[in-house]
Amino acid sequence: MGDLNRLLTDMLLGRSGGGLGPLGDQVVGETSEGRPVIANPDGSYSTERTATVLDPRLNQGRPTNVPTIYNGQQMGEDQAVSYLLANGMVPGSMPEGGMAVDPETGRIMQGYDSIPEATRAARLRSPSIAMNFYPPYKGF
Protein backbone atom coordinates (compact mmCIF):
# COMPACT_ATOMS: atom_id res chain seq x y z
CA MET A 1 0.00 0.00 0.00
CA GLY A 2 2.99 2.31 0.54
CA ASP A 3 3.79 2.69 -3.18
CA LEU A 4 0.21 3.63 -3.99
CA ASN A 5 0.06 6.10 -1.11
CA ARG A 6 3.34 7.67 -2.23
CA LEU A 7 2.09 7.85 -5.81
CA LEU A 8 -1.20 9.47 -4.84
CA THR A 9 0.46 11.90 -2.43
CA ASP A 10 2.99 12.96 -5.05
CA MET A 11 0.22 13.48 -7.59
CA LEU A 12 -2.00 15.44 -5.22
CA LEU A 13 0.89 17.66 -4.15
CA GLY A 14 1.84 18.34 -7.72
CA ARG A 15 5.13 16.51 -7.56
CA SER A 16 4.47 14.93 -10.92
CA GLY A 17 6.12 16.91 -13.66
CA GLY A 18 9.64 17.72 -14.76
CA GLY A 19 11.16 15.94 -11.76
CA LEU A 20 9.96 12.50 -12.73
CA GLY A 21 12.49 9.74 -12.95
CA PRO A 22 13.28 7.72 -16.05
CA LEU A 23 10.46 5.83 -17.71
CA GLY A 24 10.72 2.07 -17.49
CA ASP A 25 10.40 -0.33 -20.39
CA GLN A 26 8.18 -3.05 -18.91
CA VAL A 27 4.42 -2.82 -19.51
CA VAL A 28 2.72 -4.52 -16.56
CA GLY A 29 -0.96 -3.86 -17.33
CA GLU A 30 -3.27 -1.17 -18.52
CA THR A 31 -5.61 1.45 -17.15
CA SER A 32 -9.37 1.25 -17.54
CA GLU A 33 -8.95 3.66 -20.49
CA GLY A 34 -6.53 1.28 -22.20
CA ARG A 35 -3.32 3.22 -21.58
CA PRO A 36 -0.29 1.00 -20.74
CA VAL A 37 0.95 0.87 -17.14
CA ILE A 38 4.75 1.01 -17.16
CA ALA A 39 6.93 -0.16 -14.27
CA ASN A 40 9.73 2.38 -13.69
CA PRO A 41 13.25 1.64 -12.39
CA ASP A 42 12.54 3.52 -9.12
CA GLY A 43 9.60 1.22 -8.29
CA SER A 44 6.90 3.68 -9.35
CA TYR A 45 4.45 3.23 -12.21
CA SER A 46 3.65 5.55 -15.10
CA THR A 47 0.46 5.58 -17.12
CA GLU A 48 0.37 9.11 -18.36
CA ARG A 49 2.84 11.93 -18.13
CA THR A 50 1.49 15.17 -19.48
CA ALA A 51 2.58 18.61 -20.56
CA THR A 52 0.39 21.68 -20.79
CA VAL A 53 0.91 23.19 -24.22
CA LEU A 54 -0.20 26.33 -26.02
CA ASP A 55 -0.24 25.41 -29.67
CA PRO A 56 -2.48 27.20 -32.19
CA ARG A 57 -3.11 23.89 -33.97
CA LEU A 58 -4.72 22.33 -30.86
CA ASN A 59 -7.98 23.57 -29.33
CA GLN A 60 -7.60 27.02 -30.90
CA GLY A 61 -4.38 27.60 -28.96
CA ARG A 62 -6.02 27.20 -25.55
CA PRO A 63 -3.94 25.50 -22.82
CA THR A 64 -4.23 21.76 -23.40
CA ASN A 65 -2.86 18.88 -21.32
CA VAL A 66 -1.27 16.46 -23.76
CA PRO A 67 0.10 13.02 -22.90
CA THR A 68 3.82 12.67 -23.51
CA ILE A 69 3.91 8.86 -23.40
CA TYR A 70 2.76 7.10 -26.54
CA ASN A 71 3.38 3.48 -27.48
CA GLY A 72 5.23 3.11 -24.19
CA GLN A 73 7.80 5.78 -25.12
CA GLN A 74 8.39 9.17 -23.49
CA MET A 75 8.19 12.07 -25.95
CA GLY A 76 9.12 15.70 -25.65
CA GLU A 77 6.35 18.31 -25.86
CA ASP A 78 6.98 19.13 -29.53
CA GLN A 79 7.11 15.45 -30.47
CA ALA A 80 3.87 14.75 -28.52
CA VAL A 81 2.09 17.63 -30.29
CA SER A 82 3.33 16.36 -33.67
CA TYR A 83 2.13 12.86 -32.79
CA LEU A 84 -1.31 14.22 -31.88
CA LEU A 85 -1.54 16.25 -35.07
CA ALA A 86 -0.74 13.14 -37.10
CA ASN A 87 -2.84 10.63 -35.11
CA GLY A 88 -5.32 12.30 -32.80
CA MET A 89 -7.34 15.04 -34.41
CA VAL A 90 -11.13 15.08 -34.75
CA PRO A 91 -11.91 14.74 -38.46
CA GLY A 92 -12.97 18.05 -39.96
CA SER A 93 -11.49 20.11 -37.14
CA MET A 94 -8.27 20.84 -39.02
CA PRO A 95 -6.24 22.68 -40.16
CA GLU A 96 -6.44 25.55 -37.65
CA GLY A 97 -7.18 25.09 -33.99
CA GLY A 98 -8.45 21.53 -34.27
CA MET A 99 -9.85 19.44 -31.45
CA ALA A 100 -7.40 16.82 -30.20
CA VAL A 101 -8.32 13.27 -29.21
CA ASP A 102 -5.93 10.99 -27.36
CA PRO A 103 -5.15 8.33 -30.00
CA GLU A 104 -4.55 5.66 -27.33
CA THR A 105 -7.78 6.18 -25.36
CA GLY A 106 -10.16 8.13 -27.61
CA ARG A 107 -10.58 10.74 -24.86
CA ILE A 108 -11.18 14.29 -26.10
CA MET A 109 -8.44 16.57 -24.84
CA GLN A 110 -10.07 19.67 -23.46
CA GLY A 111 -8.76 23.19 -24.01
CA TYR A 112 -8.76 25.34 -20.86
CA ASP A 113 -9.12 29.07 -20.30
CA SER A 114 -5.81 29.39 -18.44
CA ILE A 115 -2.65 27.46 -17.61
CA PRO A 116 -3.55 27.32 -13.88
CA GLU A 117 -6.94 25.81 -14.82
CA ALA A 118 -5.23 23.21 -17.04
CA THR A 119 -2.70 22.38 -14.32
CA ARG A 120 -5.49 21.98 -11.75
CA ALA A 121 -7.36 19.63 -14.10
CA ALA A 122 -4.24 17.51 -14.63
CA ARG A 123 -3.68 17.20 -10.89
CA LEU A 124 -7.30 16.20 -10.32
CA ARG A 125 -7.11 13.60 -13.10
CA SER A 126 -3.96 11.90 -11.81
CA PRO A 127 -5.45 10.07 -8.81
CA SER A 128 -8.33 8.74 -10.91
CA ILE A 129 -5.83 7.18 -13.32
CA ALA A 130 -3.87 5.65 -10.43
CA MET A 131 -7.02 4.10 -8.98
CA ASN A 132 -8.08 2.51 -12.27
CA PHE A 133 -5.20 0.15 -12.97
CA TYR A 134 -6.36 -3.06 -14.58
CA PRO A 135 -5.77 -5.67 -13.41
CA PRO A 136 -5.18 -4.67 -9.79
CA TYR A 137 -1.51 -4.73 -8.89
CA LYS A 138 0.07 -6.82 -6.18
CA GLY A 139 2.38 -4.88 -3.91
CA PHE A 140 0.42 -1.64 -3.69
Image (spheres, helix red, strand yellow):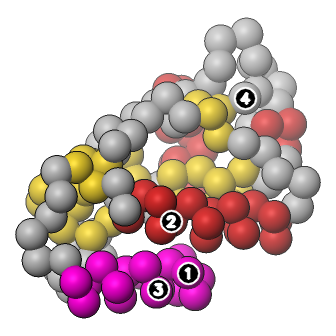
Query: Is any part of residue 54 visible from this angle?
Result: no
Q: Residue at x 49, y 29 (%)?
A: 106
Mark 2 to mark 3 CA distance (whole Å): 10 Å
Residues tagged 3 and 1 counted as in contact (Cβ below 8 A): yes
Crowding around mark 2 (Cα neighbors within 10 Å: few <14, some 14 to 19, many 20+) is many
Looking at marks 2 and 3 on the same chain, the residue that comes earlier in the sequence is marked by 3
Q: Which residue is mark 1?
A: 12
| Residue occupying the far right of the picture | 113
Q: Which residue is mark 3?
A: 10
* Residue 79 vertical placement versus 84 (above, below): below
**Residue kind at label 2, given as amino acid type:** Ser
Dot 4, crowdedness within 10 Å: few (<14), some or many (≥20)? many
Cα–Cα gap, marks 3 and 1:
6 Å
Q: Which mark is residue 99?
A: 4
Q: CA distance from mark 4 to mark 3?
A: 30 Å
- Mark 3 surroundings: few (<14), some (14-19) or many (≥20) residues within 10 A: some
Q: Residue 137 location, x and y as percent?
A: 15, 64
Sort mark 1 into few (<14), some (14-19) or many (20+) by Cα contacts within 10 Å.
Answer: some
The residue identified by callout 2 is 126
Residue 9 falls inside the magenta stretch: yes
- Asked if the residues shown at circle 1 and circle 2 are in contact, with their CB atoms under 8 angstroms apart, the answer is yes
> Which amino acid type is marked by label 4?
Met
Q: CA distance from mark 1 to mark 2?
A: 8 Å
Q: Earlier in the sequence, mark 4 or mark 2?
A: 4
Q: Amino acid at mark 1?
A: Leu
Q: Secondary structure at mark 3?
A: helix
Q: Is residue 37 left or right of residue 138?
A: right
Looking at the image, can residue 104 be seen?
yes
**Residue 138 belongs to the span the image colors magenta:** no
